[in-house]
Amino acid sequence: MKTLRLSLLPAAVVSVFLFSQCVSFLPAADRPFEKEKLPAEKEKKEVPLLKSESSGFSAFSPHAVSVVARTHASSDTPGGRVLNSAVEMVDGKDLVLGSCWGYVNSVYEKAGLSKEKRGEIYKEKSSGPYADPSIITPGDWVMYCNLPYGGHGHSAIFVEWIDVERRSAITIEYVGNNRKIPGRYREADITNTYCIIRGTE
């Protein structure tokens, strides 16, 4: 498998789509982070390498994931503005009770991207065919079958790939089902992405 190095994208873009149903994600679905910190020089100079010898989310510190998200959020594009709003909401532990769709919609509204400022990049039935991962960019609102939870539809904001070959991505999302849990970073298998919506200028 390839090891991917993250880089600043000159034009991160955003996506949004309505979800009729979300399933609950329990904390156990998240793998714990290690407590290591990035060297100060890496924090300032470059986006960290988001892949290590041991694959999976647990190899990355919360700090490393946050640096990746903040780097993409610094772009003055629709995608950057969405991620900036999402990072602020995660850091502030903002509660948006309801569905996963409602949470991501709130992020987009906060970023100034109303429904009129969103474009459909890809849309198919939940049974596929599924989107080519190469068209997914930071800030996209992805609609995908949540395979570990029975393949139910779920929505999230794409942050960055952990391993594109495995379709493993860092996302910002909410558990849904009206749970009193703030949005958070999560590793998600977005193999079966059937809709992508982006913000427009």
Image (spheres, rainbow, N blue to C red):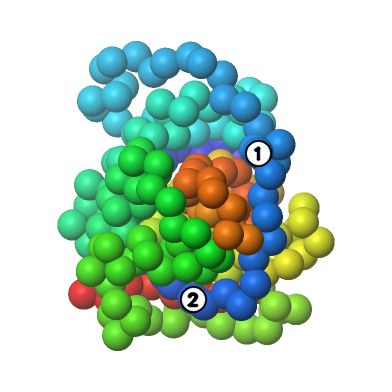
Q: Residue at x 38, y 48 (%)?
A: 94
Question: Tag on residue 27?
Answer: 1
Q: Residues within 10 Å of mark 2 (few under 14, many from 20)?
A: many
Side of 10 where 177 appears, left or right: right
Q: CA distance from mark 1 to mark 2?
A: 24 Å
Residue 66 occupies quadrant: top left
Amino acid marked by disc 2 = Phe
Q: Nearer the viewer, mark 1 or mark 2?
A: 1
Image height of 88 relative to 32, above or below: below
Residue at (60, 44) in percent of width and height: 187
Residue 134 in view, yes or no: no
**Helix, strand or loop for disc 1:** helix
Instruction: Give the answer, above or below, for where 100 lies relative to 184.
Output: below
Q: Residue at x 47, y 48 (%)?
A: 183
Seen from the viewer's position, the closer of residues 71 and 133 is 71
- Look at mark 2 in the image and give the residue it sits on: 17
Report helix, strand or loop for mark 2: loop
Find residue 154 and report its horizontal and vertical position in percent. Answer: 62, 65
Q: Quadrant of the C terminus?
A: bottom left
Disc 1 marks a residue whose amino acid type is Pro
Above or below, 132 relative to 49: below
35 or 10: nearer the viewer: 35
Q: Along the line of sight, which residue is nearer the eye, 90 or 167? A: 90
Label whose residue precedes the other's in the sequence (1 or 2)? 2
User: In the displayed structure, does residue 11 sit left or right of residue 141?
Assistant: left
